[in-house]
Image (spheres, helix red, strand yellow):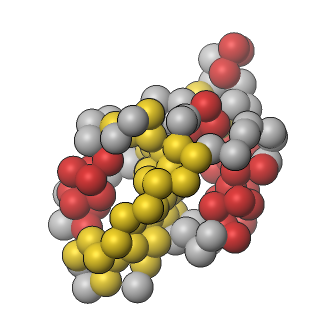
């Protein structure tokens, strides 16, 4: 069983990981979604969200964009980071489960979003 978190605004993948409204957490087993839960973003503080999601048992995080600091923390927890994808959260997870979703390495470097995405 895996847990895939998607950084969302509404039911869509957000471009800015740290500033998302919520995380849709999909529990999957044998390549199929078996449960879905919406968890409000508890607040953006540097380094907090990757550890928060790790504590929830997340194995994979999907977002449109993410800062390098967050990527490093996820990597330290062996959580797969998939960035550069937009669209409906459930559809994106289904593509991921089918092996049809690729990470573009979309790490935010803009000054106003530095270490925030």
Q: Residue at x 26, y 41 (%)?
A: 88
Q: Is residue 113 left or right of residue 7?
A: right
Quadrant for the C terminus in the image: top right
User: What residue lies at 39% left-to-right and 48% top-to-bottom?
Assistant: 103
Q: Is residue 51 above or below residue 108?
A: below
* Residue shown at 71% from the left, 15% from the top: 111
Residue 31 in the image, given as x and y percentages of width and height: 24, 78
Among the 4 quarters of the image, the one containing residue 115: top right
Asked if residue 86 lies left or right of residue 14, the reply is left
Residue located at (54% from left, 36% from top) = 21
Relative to 74, is 33 above or below? below
Q: Is residue 87 left or right of residue 40?
A: left
Could you say where residue 83 lies in the image, as x and y percent from the top left?
44, 44
Residue 69 image point, x, y percent: 73, 43
Foreground of the two, 75 or 20 = 20
Q: Is residue 98 above or below residue 85?
A: below
Q: Is residue 67 above or below residue 90?
A: above
Can residue 75 be seen in this snapshot? Answer: no
Residue 85 quadrant? top left
Q: Residue farthest to the top?
A: 112
Q: Along the line of sight, which residue is nearer the eye, 57 or 97?
A: 57
Is residue 13 visible in the rendered structure shown here?
yes
């Amino acid at each position: 069983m895996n847990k895939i978190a998607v950084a969302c605004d509404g039911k869509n993948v957000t471009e800015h990981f740290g500033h998302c409204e919520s995380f849709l957490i999909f529990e999957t087993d044998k390549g199929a979604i078996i449960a879905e839960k919406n968890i409000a973003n508890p607040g953006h503080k540097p380094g907090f969200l990757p550890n928060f999601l790790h504590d929830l048992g997340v194995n994979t995080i999907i977002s449109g964009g993410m800062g390098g600091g967050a990527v490093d923390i996820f990597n330290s927890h062996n959580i797969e980071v998939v960035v550069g994808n937009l669209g409906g959260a459930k559809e994106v997870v289904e593509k991921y489960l089918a092996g049809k979703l690729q990470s573009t390495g979309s790490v935010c470097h803009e000054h106003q979003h530095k270490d925030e995405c």
